[in-house]
Amino acid sequence: RRNKCAESLAVNVNRLKLYKSKLLIFPNKSGKKGVKKGDTPKSELTNVAQNTFKEIIPVERPTLRVKARAISAEEKEASAYKTLKKARTNLKYDGAKRKKAEEAKSKDA
């Protein structure tokens, strides 16, 4: 999946940066040979508590609540079914309408 929204991509990048800043990497082996580049120094690893929570860094969800309001007369009058049906028929006969218009244009010319 590609993240096409720049705002959500920026939020995810910031979450990952925060996660990496809090991450403590223990060396695989003890001694100087077991320490690799990027491992946390021994001084910082003393008395480190393990995270047992389900979510390490929670994803902030925006509130999508819309306040209740009165339905306008225009909204009551409009029919969603009729609007969709009209769009479907327009799409279905679009080619025929263009062909007919092209023929009428060529007759006039």
Image (cartoon, grey):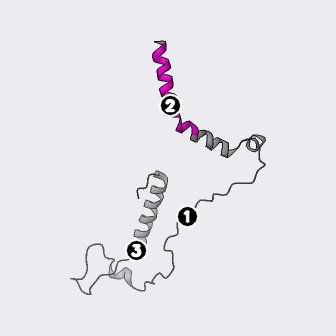
Question: Label for residue 36?
Answer: none
Task: Please name the amino acid that badge 1 sits on.
Answer: Glu
Could you tell me residue 88's position as x and y percent? 57, 41
| N-terminal label among 3 and 2 | 3
Residue at (62, 39) in percent of width and height: 86
Residue at (39, 85) in percent of width and height: 46
Indicate the secondary structure of the residue bearing disc 3: loop
Task: Kindly report the secondary structure that dominates the magenta region of the rendered protein.
Answer: helix
Horizontal side of 74 relative to 29 (left or right) equals: right
- In the depicted view, which residue is nearer to us: 97 or 31? 97
Alpha carbon of mark 1 to alpha carbon of mark 3: how far?
20 Å
- In the depicted view, which residue is nearer to us: 42 or 73? 73
Could you tell me residue 19's position as x and y percent? 43, 69
Vertical comparison of 106 with 40: above or below = above
Alpha carbon of mark 3 to alpha carbon of mark 2: how far?
63 Å
- Pointers 1 and 3 in contact (C-beta within 8 Å): no
Residue at (46, 64) in percent of width and height: 15
Give the position of the C terminus as an image quadrant.
top left
User: How crowded is the residue under tag 2: few (<14 C-alpha within 10 Å), some, or many (20+)?
Assistant: few
According to the picture, the residue beneath numbered tag 3 turns out to be: 23
User: How crowded is the residue under tag 1: few (<14 C-alpha within 10 Å), some, or many (20+)?
Assistant: few
Could you tell me residue 34's position as x and y percent? 24, 83
Q: Which contiguous range is marked in magenta?
A: 89-107
Give the position of the N terminus as an image quadrant.
bottom left
Alpha carbon of mark 2 to alpha carbon of mark 1: how far?
50 Å
Horizontal side of 46 relative to 33 (left or right) equals: right
Vertical comparison of 77 with 63: above or below = above
Q: Nearer the viewer, mark 1 or mark 3?
A: 1
